[in-house]
Amino acid sequence: MKNLFFVSLLIFATGCATEEYKPMPSPPAETATAAAPAAKSGVYHKVMRGQTLWQIAQAYGVGIKDIIDSNNIPNGSALEVGQLLFIPGAAQIKDLSEHVTVDQNKNAFIWPLKGKVVAYFDDPIGVSTVNHGIDIQAQAGDTVQAVREGDVVLAGYMSGYGQTVMIDHKDGFISVYARNARLLVKLGDHVYKGDTIAEVGQIGSRVVEHFEIRRGSQAMNPLYYLP
């Protein structure tokens, strides 16, 4: 009897020792869900005839550079009628005719003369410098007009620019008109938008007008200001 009990106990113990125990299931791993990038807020503005990047930026209260960067606008591009511009941070589309003030209209720039742009802002000049404005193709005898009202702060020869007129517009902007054949204003003159200030000259064999817009000491792309 004892032997039978001992054998039964041995069989039970052996069974317990050889029984496979399934491990406890691991808790499901937490899946990290990457948050979708938030959509950039803003609106699309449709460019109307005569509007400039500068006017649009003023109306929406954003920087020109913010609009340039958001729309990947290259240096050589002027705005086109019907073009859609993304205005970052804007909450609603604005009608510029309602949001451009009388002063802003008065201070809007005009072209110094009409012609094809043959050299653009930031175009390389030689091996160590770039164009700080634009070169506008013209014909001998064409006249140059002031792009805005202001005071003539330079009327004479400037190294690298030839016969040059500089007009201070009294709000941080200065316009520069270079490579002229003849100057029609003198230092200290007060000029109004559209006044004739010079006659076009030549760069080599080309009849062109070199034109710049500066804000303080920084050269700006004139195409962002011209309609």
Image (cartoon, rainbow, N blue to C red):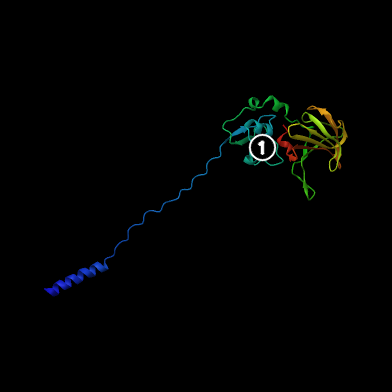
Residue 177 is at least partly visible in this image: yes
The local secondary structure at tag 1 comes to helix
The N terminus, quarter of image = bottom left
Above or below, 146 against 71 in this view is: above
Residue shown at 14%/75% (left/top)?
3
Q: In which quarter of the view is residue 117 placed?
A: top right
> Do we see residue 142 in this rendering?
no
Q: Please tell me whether residue 194 is drawn above or below residue 159 in the rendered image.
A: above
In front: 215, or 29? 215
Which residue is at 69% across, 24% downward? 102
The amino acid type found where label 1 is placed reads Ile
Quarter of the figure with residue 79: top right
Residue 41 percent location from the top left of the image: 56, 37
Q: Specify whether 22 is left or right of 143.
A: left
Judging depth in this view, the residue of 179 and 149 nearest the camera is 149
Up the image or down, 184 lies above or below 206; here it is: above
Q: Name, please, the residue furthest toward the right.
A: 182
* Residues packed near mark 1 inside 10 Å, few (<14), some (14 to 19) or many (20 plus): some
Frontmost residue, 158 versus 11: 158
Question: Residue 202's x, y, as percent?
Answer: 86, 39
Q: Residue at the left extreme? A: 1
The residue lying toward the viewer, choosing from 221 and 207, is 221
The total of numbered circles placed on residues is 1
**How far across and how far down the image is residue 188, in percent?**
84, 30
Q: Is residue 139 left or right of residue 79?
A: right
Q: Say which residue label 1 marks.
A: 64
